[in-house]
Amino acid sequence: MSFRAEENLTCPVCQDIFNEPVILTCSHSFCRDCVQTWWRGKPSHECPVCKEKTLLSDPPRNLALKNLCESFLLERDSKRSESVCGLHGEKLKLFCLDHQQPVCVVCLHSETHKDHGFRPVDEVAQNRRDELQRHLTPLQGKLTLCQRVRANCEQTAEHVEVQARRTEGEMKRQFEKLHRFLREEEEARIGALREEEELKSRTMKEKTEALGREIAALSHAVRAAEEELRAEDVSFLLNYPAAEERLRRRPLPDDPQPLSGALIDVAKHLGNLTFNIWNAMREVVSYAPVILDPNTANPELAVSEDLTGVTHGERQKLPENPERIDYHRSVLGSEGFDSGTRSWEVEVGDSASWFLGVAAESVQRKGHIHSGIWRLGLSNGQYKACSPSAPAVVLTAKAKLRRVGVHLDWDGGNLSFYDLDADAHVHTFTHTFAEKLFPYVSNSDEFPVRILNEVLAVPFAP
């Protein structure tokens, strides 16, 4: 570095450090005296390096270069003075062990250093360098660790923003699905109400029109009879036979009755409305007994948007958070169990490498996991059952497992697996569990493994 600095600060003419450097229009710099001497006796002023002609007879000073040169000379002189004995002007080649300072060969024979121990400067310097390096190495390690953690914190902060935006987007999609269902349900129910209103209004209109016609006919007959009654006796007696015949031949209509069910069936439309809507909503909502925690997923696993499926793929750039499993292609459930019984169903489908089970809360998540997992799965074409306290057991399956049921009885100390398609028991682990257990899913195949949704049951019908 020192050689390169001196080379860059050297005048191309005198080959020494610049003294009062000036700069030409071609951007080359020289000592003022050097360039003036170079131009002396020449017909034109040209650059000593590139031969470009300049019209300036007195080039401007290069102040930046001048300052660099002065700083370099000061530093070089300081270093030279440090390596020379201040008393004798000789190089400091020895190190006095008693005075703990560098000395020259003349100091070796002086009264000041009589009977002192000496070592070569380079030997003592190397020993001191080694000692300082021993103290420096842990600090360098801590520095590297802090830098890595800080980088991870920055990456985590960026990932938090990405997670928040993705989660917000998925929440909006799911709420929009519910909003769309409610809008459609509202339109359907209001449409049914309007349809009933139209039907019953039309029926009442027809009934009213029929009664109007009947009233008109009866009114005409009544008015005619009343006129006959008001006639003179002789006229009345002459017209009586015809009037009596007309009234006798006209039959009396049945008494009109109000229509039953003519009103809007309000109870049908409003009774248990929210319950009925919730019941119908079961067709558009789902419930998974196990939700996967993407913060625990190995970087090579992609967790589905609904947090129920997992697929193996390219390694993602994710934060090195403590919860994440970094070696095994695995992911844990978001909720742990430390009592009672739990059951969930998993579709492994066409995946050729998978494991299902439970993992203890204290399971080692960094590096190879040696214990704390009870699991059953398919690996290298064989079905295996693995537990912390026993070697892996190779299982014989009558048919390919595609849907597997997992049943955990924490209090009873049992973890059982079932072939749901064949309705057959596959394997059971027996262990006295002592800590919280989390559902465990591993997949090393591009085909997905996913938790199956449960059918929502209605406690009673409306």
Image (cartoon, rainbow, N blue to C red):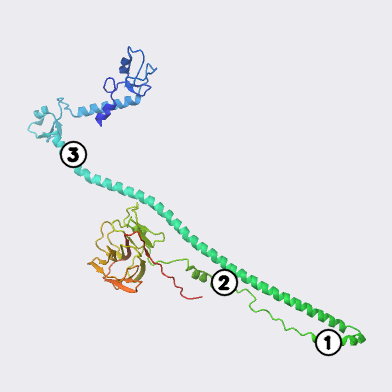
Q: CA distance from mark 1 to mark 2?
A: 56 Å
Q: Which residue is mark 1?
A: 245
Can residue 408 be seen from the camera position used here?
no
Q: Which residue is mark 3?
A: 129
Q: Which residue is mark 2?
A: 270
Horizontal side of 151 relative to 104 (left or right) equals right
Name the residue rendered at 19%, 41% in the picture.
132
Horizontal side of 220 relative to 84 (left or right) equals right
The first of marks 3 and 1 along the sequence is 3
> Which residue is more in the foreground, 456 or 364?
456
Mark 1 or mark 2, which is nearer to you? 1
Q: Are marks 1 and 2 in contact (CB under 8 Å)?
A: no
The amino acid type of the residue labelled 1 equals: Glu
Q: CA distance from mark 2 to mark 3?
A: 89 Å
- Local SS, label 3: helix
- Local SS, label 1: helix
- Local SS, label 2: helix
The quadrant of the picture occupied by the N terminus is: top left
The amino acid type of the residue labelled 3 equals: Arg
Can residue 287 be seen from the camera position used here?
yes
Mark 3 or mark 1, which is nearer to you? 1
Classed neighbour count for the residue bearing mark 2: other residues with Cα under 10 Å, few (<14), some (14–19), many (≥20): few
Classed neighbour count for the residue bearing mark 1: other residues with Cα under 10 Å, few (<14), some (14–19), many (≥20): few
Q: Quadrant of residue 31?
A: top left
The x, y position of residue 457, in whole percent, is 44, 72
> Which residue is more in the foreground, 145 or 326?
326
The amino acid type of the residue labelled 2 equals: Leu
> Which residue is more in the foreground, 443 or 363?
443
In the rendered image, the residue lying farthest to the left is: 115
